[in-house]
Amino acid sequence: MAKLTLKKKEDAQDSTLSEVRGYARKIWLAGVGAYARVGQEGSEYFKELVKAGEVVEKRGKKTLDKKLDAANGQLDEAAEEVSRVRGKVEVQLDKIEKAFDARVARALNRIGIPSKHDVEALSIKLEQLTELLERVARKP
């Protein structure tokens, strides 16, 4: 009986080993089959993926272009508003400058310092007097 038990164990081991080999062969064949199918259908699937990618890219570009146009429009509006405000500020600064100049001129006039206009008027009169003196000096 001891021989029988040993033979049954060896048969069980051979059977298990045979099953493992069978599964390993099936796994190998499944891998080879997958590789063959990818080779056959892979290029078609790749083309489908490329088409889907192109569609998504076009949609993305359209969305991006719309958002970019909207942003540029807002920038243009902001630039126009800045120009309007700048013009108003310049006008106000000119008014302030003229008011300041007038006040300074009045203050200088009160303390007896002639204005630029007064100096220019005196220069013109001085030139006229110089010409008159030159003419009188030539007559003798």
Image (cartoon, rainbow, N blue to C red):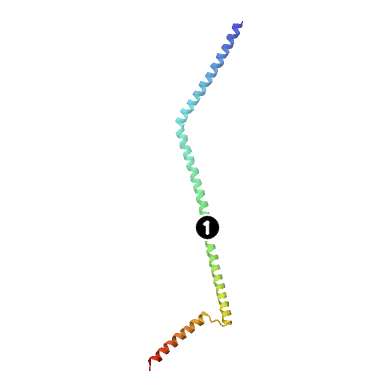
Would you identify the image quadrant in which residue 10 lies? top right
The answer to which of 75 and 113 lies nearer the viewer is 113
Would you identify the image quadrant in which residue 47 lies? top left
Q: Which image quarter is the N terminus in?
A: top right
Q: How many marks?
A: 1
Residue at the farthest right position: 1
Up-down relation of residue 65 to residue 113 (above or below): above
Crowd rating for badge 1 (residues with CA inside 10 Å; few <14, some 14–19, many 20+): few
At mark 1, the secondary structure is helix
Q: Position of residue 78 (x, y in %)?
A: 54, 60
Residue at the farthest top position: 1
Q: Residue at x 47, y 39 (%)?
A: 50
Q: Residue at x 46, y 36 (%)?
A: 46
Q: Position of residue 35 (x, y in %)?
A: 47, 28
Up-down relation of residue 32 to residue 104 (above or below): above
Left or right placement of residue 139 versus residue 49 in this view? left
Residue holding disc 1? 75
Amino acid type of the residue that numbered disc 1 sits on in the rendered structure: Leu
Q: Position of residue 113 (x, y in %)?
A: 55, 81
Up-down relation of residue 118 to residue 21 (above or below): below
Left or right placement of residue 24 versus residue 128 in this view? right
Q: Position of residue 42 (x, y in %)?
A: 46, 32
Q: Which image quarter is the C terminus in?
A: bottom left
The answer to which of 101 and 133 lies nearer the viewer is 133
Up-down relation of residue 16 to residue 84 (above or below): above
Q: Residue at x 42, y 89 (%)?
A: 133
Q: Residue at x 42, y 87 (%)?
A: 131
